[in-house]
């Protein structure tokens, strides 16, 4: 979902729980059981305390033991009345929040805030409908703007669907006035191919082997 620094004591592990009946609605009031697998090792109980954030989101408190091994960190969460959730984090050596915007409920940057346009609501939630076009020509493209991101020149940009494990839409970026804007366009055929559901996204930039998260949120796909 996003990178965390090795042995850190400040970066929580966030995950979303959805209702087991409709598989869409965020499920609140749970006491999830969370297991972690570090770099391919067997799953074991997390060391950090698990608590509810709100609106279906939960977190594992930052713990140096949980983030102690470099590589993929797999989170498996279960709870009565909710769909099981699996999230992949990446434990890295450097602090991934040292020079970019981070997410704290609403998207607040370390050196600037993210501004949303189009179907992206304040807080980063995206709501689109199947079969509809979200393109610049119609003024409906998805946009994120921030003055605190690292330079995106030369980066590979993706709107990454964390559930489907694939990139969505056509993406581009512009810079000017001290800010950078990332624009994602989705054609009607692209949205028609999506299942009506809520899913996690990461707006991310890849520099060689390093993946940098720019914004994180939920895409709610509705029937047309």
Image (spheres, rainbow, N blue to C red):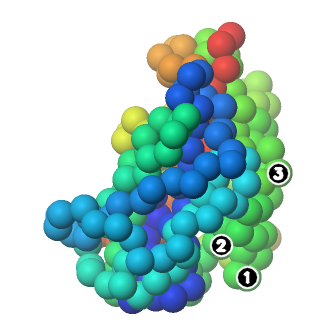
Is residue 121 shown above or below 34? Answer: above
Report the front residue among 144 and 42.
42
State the image coordinates of residue 138 (x, y, percent, origin top left): 76, 25
Q: CA distance from mark 1 to mark 3?
A: 18 Å
State the image coordinates of residue 188 (x, y, percent, origin top left): 59, 16
Crowding at dot 3, Cα within 10 Å, few <14 / some 14-19 / many 20+, comes out as few
Q: Residue at x 48, y 17 (%)?
A: 193
User: Would residue 80 appear left or right of 42 to someone viewing this image?
Assistant: right
State the image coordinates of residue 41 (x, y, percent, origin top left): 17, 67
Crowding at dot 1, Cα within 10 Å, few <14 / some 14-19 / many 20+, comes out as some
Q: Earlier in the sequence, mark 1 or mark 2?
A: 2
Report the front residue among 100 and 22.
22
User: Marks 2 and 1: in contact by CB < 8 Å?
Assistant: yes
Q: Quadrant of residue 211?
A: bottom left
Mark 1, secondary structure of its residue: loop
Q: Earlier in the sequence, mark 1 or mark 3?
A: 1
The residue under label 3 is: 122
Mark 3, secondary structure of its residue: loop
The residue under label 2 is: 101
User: Would residue 114 appear left or right of 83 to someone viewing this image?
Assistant: right
The residue under label 1 is: 111
Farthest residue to the left: give it: 41
User: Would residue 117 appear left or right of 35 to someone viewing this image?
Assistant: right
């Amino acid at each position: 979902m996003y990178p965390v620094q090795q042995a850190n004591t400040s970066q929580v592990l966030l995950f979303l729980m959805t209702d087991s009946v409709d598989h869409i609605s965020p499920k609140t009031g749970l006491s999830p059981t969370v297991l972690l697998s570090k770099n391919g090792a067997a799953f074991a109980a997390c060391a950090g305390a698990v608590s509810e954030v709100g609106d279906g989101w939960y977190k594992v408190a930052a713990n140096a033991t949980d983030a102690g091994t470099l590589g993929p960190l797999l989170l498996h969460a279960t709870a009565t009345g909710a769909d099981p959730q699996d999230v992949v984090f990446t434990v890295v050596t450097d602090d991934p929040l040292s020079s970019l915007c981070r997410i704290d409920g609403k998207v607040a940057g370390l050196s600037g805030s993210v501004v949303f346009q189009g179907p992206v609501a304040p807080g980063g939630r995206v709501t689109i409908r199947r079969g509809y076009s979200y393109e610049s020509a119609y003024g409906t493209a998805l946009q994120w703007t921030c003055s605190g991101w690292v330079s995106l020149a030369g980066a590979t940009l993706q709107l990454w669907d964390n559930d489907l494990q694939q990139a969505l839409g056509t993406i581009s970026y512009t810079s000017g006035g001290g800010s950078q804007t990332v624009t994602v366009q989705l054609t009607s055929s692209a949205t028609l191919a999506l299942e009506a559901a809520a899913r996690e996204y990461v707006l991310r930039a890849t520099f060689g082997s390093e993946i940098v998260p720019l914004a994180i949120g939920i895409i709610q796909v509705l029937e047309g």
